[in-house]
Amino acid sequence: MTVRARAVSLISGGLDSMLATKMVLDQGVDVVGINIYTGFCITGHTQAIRFKHKEKPKRNNALWVADQLGVELHILDVVAEYKDIVIHPKHGYGAHLNPCLDCKGLMVRKAREWMERHGFDFVLTGEVLGQRPKSQLKSKLPIVARDSGTEDLLLRPLSAKLLRPTLPERNGWVDRDRLGAISGRSRRGQIALAKAYGFTGYAQPAGGCCFLTDANYSAKLRDFWRYREKKDYELDDIMLLKVGRHLRPRPHFKMIIARDEGENRFLQGYCRRFTHLTSDSHPGPVVLLDGETNDEDVALAARVTARFGKGRDEQEVRVRVTAMDGSARIMSVSPWSSEQIPEDWYL
Amino acid sequence: MSRFTLDARNLICPLPVVRTQEKVEQLRSGDELEVVCTDPGVLHDIPAWCRIHGHEVIEAVEREGELVVRLRVRKLEG
């Protein structure tokens, strides 16, 4: 009896890892999917929080891919471990605070650890030679294999024919001739393959899958580190950086202002941990104050809060200020105009 | 068979699924788990996770502004 090889596939939820997994599944290999949750993943968060794009399905793409392919998927929470990658990336950052090469190394390492724990044979990824400047250059792929400890057990099915044969190929667990020779930033090869497999409804690439590749998000994280005077974070800190408008009127405090009902609901979950403001007389945003504030700061924040509510054109708006201990007071303020809020307060 | 509840309110995707995954690992085949969430994505994600892993979804509904997914754990014994 032939024993089927068993592989662990890193499934991000994008098309590349879906194709790579399918390519190996079709060769009779048993595949289990692993999805890594770092805290910075774009999939899910923003779509779940905000009310916009309501027509789009609110789905986790990795689960969707696994469901489509009929493979198990295990989501690994690496939030705590990931901190060191973000704060001290051995290979440095990309254009923003994205530690792509270190990140890939960690993800593949987690897959390898899972492989070893469960007696699987090799790891596969959807990496495409030359597709991403930081982590998928020909010179960088061996770094991922080395840092992750997978070395010869790491198969990149989409580009395999352009790379040195790995152990799964040499051992005949997979047929190299039936693997891909895709390279570069063009998506033509992947789209043609998706069509050949009959895949529809897969996630479209929209500027990456990680908030750390986003200039605005990175600017907010830098600001957070600067004013906390410490390069560190907790999960809630990085979640809050994804939500609302962030304004820093003074060095010692910033305001997080919800932009719609979905964000209002989300920020309400944090109200016990921050002094927060809401408009009492008109519909408006939930606003969190992050930092130590005095009466003058709160008065300023109340006027800014009024500016972002439905009472922005009124002479007076009543704003409720609730402290962390639950005590509340009402302030009657005249809303600021948008011109009164300096541009450089916006993060 | 025992019934369990998991509070996954104020967690957003994929954490409700991650917590469900962790909880189910501790349960036995036939146990029921009710997961209470606020992230609307769970109505799709937890049933998808259950399908993949062979657990049974008893119901996935919105109730008083919260999302509730009730599932029955299915595991191969032995």
Image (spheres, rainbow, N blue to C red):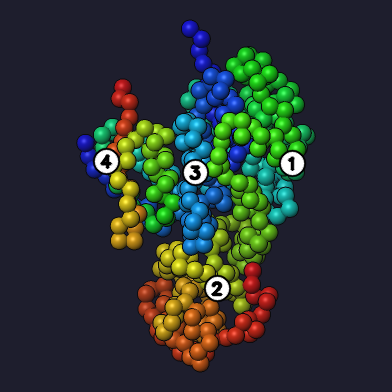
Q: Which residue is mark 1?
A: A185
Residue A35 horizontal/vertical position (percent)? 53, 39
Q: Is label 2 in a helix, a strand or a loop?
A: strand
Q: Is residue A192 visible?
A: yes
Q: Height in image: B34 above or below A74?
A: below
Give the alpha-carbon distance from disc 4 to disc 1, as whole Å. 47 Å
Amino acid at pointer 4 = Glu
Mark 3–mark 1 CB contact (< 8 Å): no
C-beta proximity under 8 Å, tags 2 and 4:
no
Q: In front of the other: label 4 or label 1?
A: 1
Instruction: Say which label, 2 or 3, has the lower sequence index.
Output: 3
Residue behind mark 3: A77
Tell me the residue that label 4 is attached to. Answer: B32
| Residue A46 position within the rendered picture, expressed as x and y whole percent measured from the top left | 53, 57
Which chain hosts label 1? A
Give the secondary structure at mark 1: loop
> What residue sits 33% from the left and 29% below the top?
B75
Q: Residues within 10 Å of mark 2 (few under 14, many from 20)?
A: many
Label of residue A210 in the image = none
Residue type beneath disc 3: Asp
- Which quarter of the picture shows residue B21? top left
Q: Earlier in the sequence, mark 2 or mark 1?
A: 1
Looking at the rendered structure, whether the residues under marks 2 and 1 are on a common chain is answered as yes
